[in-house]
Amino acid sequence: MDIIPKPEKIEVLITKLGHARDLPLPGYATKQAAGIDLFAAVEDSVPLDEGEIKLIPTGIALALPPGYEGQVRPRSGLALKHGLTVLNSPGTIDADYRGEIKVIVINLGNKPYLVQRGERIAQLVVQALVKIEWQEVGELPSSGREEGGFGHTGRF
């Protein structure tokens, strides 16, 4: 039997804004889900025509701890079944941002889609950050791959 490591837990402060008071707090759909489902805090419903982009409010604001970021990602079911995705995926929420979390969605499907109030519209993954310090050098060390880029390893 494999041992599943217990994930680290951090406390994240959250507030529901007035237009989302009746909606549940974002939550994990399953015990081992990585993403927390975000709900659409639209007034009633919002139509999205094919190719249309809209900003969908979630009705929440967060205070992520320093050293963490939130990544807003698409929900795979919406992407597969309806062509609905997060345009700037993943969208980044910095630890010092205190405004409402909003999701930039685009309808890449072949028919209009109606975003409903309370619908799970995206997911949020919280990640620890690593800060870097640049060390400028005249030449980079060899990697074996060198400048091999897009498709350099072949199709298979």
Image: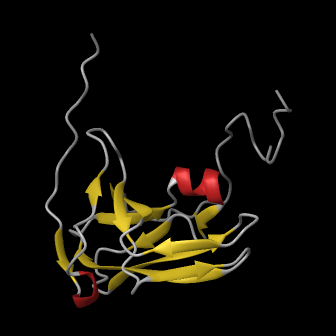
Query: Observer-nearest residue: 144 or 82?
Result: 82
Residue located at (71% from left, 66% from top): 108
Q: Position of residue 48 (x, y in %)?
A: 62, 78
Residue at the outermost top position? 1
Numbered disc total: 0
Residue located at (24% from left, 19% from top): 3
Q: Quadrant of the C terminus?
A: top right
Residue located at (30% from left, 38% from top): 32
Q: Position of residue 139 (x, y in %)?
A: 68, 54
Q: Place residue 49 in its image quadrant.
A: bottom right
The correct choice, above or below, for 111 with respect to 8 in the image is below
Q: Place residue 38 in its image quadrant.
A: bottom left
Residue 88 falls left or right of residue 51 = left
Query: Observer-nearest residue: 16 or 2?
Result: 16
The correct choice, above or below, for 143 with respect to 128 in the image is above
Residue 96 falls left or right of residue 48 = left
Residue 39 visible from this viewpoint: yes
Q: How is the image coloured?
A: secondary structure
Q: Quadrant of the N terminus?
A: top left
Q: Position of residue 10 (x, y in %)?
A: 16, 56
Query: Observer-nearest residue: 113 or 66?
Result: 113
Residue located at (39% from left, 87% from top): 43
Residue 32 falls left or right of residue 76 = left
Q: Position of residue 73 (x, y in %)?
A: 48, 61
Residue 128 visible from this viewpoint: no
